[in-house]
Image (cartoon, grey):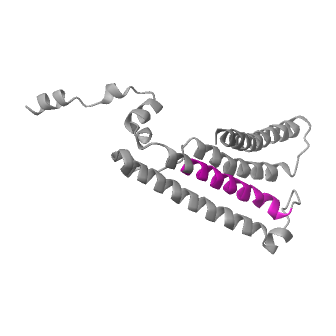
Amino acid sequence: MKTFDKYLSRVENFLAGASLIGATALAVFAVLLRNITGDVLFWSEEAIIYLIICSTFFGAVVTLRHNEHVAVDIMPTLLKGKKKKFFVVLGGLMTLIYAGFIAYLSWALISEPFSRTTITPALKLPLWVVELSLAVGMTLFFIRAAEMLIRAINAPAEELDKDVFAEEAAAVGIDVNDIAIDDDDTKEGDR
């Protein structure tokens, strides 16, 4: 599983990074060319937009891998042990179903006649080429969600018990002890 994760991470990082670097390099080149020579790359704006769209879908997979997506995790935060594991696995299963459904629809979109016959205005690419980033991105998202679900199922329940409050405090650079409420201070303040 570690080898699979290693290669999948490389693919995810390459696709997300290459598309974002490509968009940045093209934008800088187009601006410099316009300001230095006065020439305009008429197709650069469209290409930059498509590359940013690609980086968004591929970056979403990287975000999932680091478990950094926005999530409503009230129940898993309040529970411990097997109850917490149940909600973590349930959340992973729902993510897998969602990703699978969107991946299926995105591949179906590519096969539509509209996608094969429509041409982009400046680059003159078939629309399916642009839509491919959604299909590939959501397929990778599905694969990553499946990998994370398997990892959650195989993990001992105790491994999932982590102090979310302390992690959030550390993420913003605060020592959890500086903001923790001391029971002794509360009782003295009530008197």
For image coordinates 44% across by 30% down, the residue present is 170
Whether residue 9 is visible to the viewer of this picture, yes or no, is yes
Residues 89 and 28: in front is 89
Farthest-out residue, left = 191
Of the 4 image quadrants, the one containing the C terminus is top left
For image coordinates 64% across by 39% down, the residue present is 2
Quarter assignment of residue 114: bottom right
How many numbered marks appear?
Answer: 0
For image coordinates 81% across by 51% down, the residue present is 47
Is 9 magenta? The answer is no
Is 139 magenta? The answer is yes
Q: Tell me if 43 is positioned left or right of 145 in this view.
A: right
For image coordinates 80% across by 68% down, the residue present is 115
Q: Position of residue 145 (x, y in %)?
A: 59, 52
- Magenta residues span 126-149
In this rendering, is residue 183 above or below 75? above
Q: Tell me if 18 is positioned left or right of 157 in this view.
A: right
Q: Position of residue 117 (x, y in %)?
A: 86, 71
Q: Position of residue 29 (x, y in %)?
A: 84, 38
Whether residue 172 is visible to the viewer of this picture, yes or no, is no
Dominant secondary-structure state across the stretch colored magenta: helix
Residues 108 and 2: in front is 2
Of the 4 image quadrants, the one containing the N terminus is top right
Residues 140 and 70: in front is 140
Q: Position of residue 51 (x, y in %)?
A: 76, 49
Q: Tell me if 86 is positioned left or right of 21 in this view.
A: left
Farthest-out residue, bottom = 113
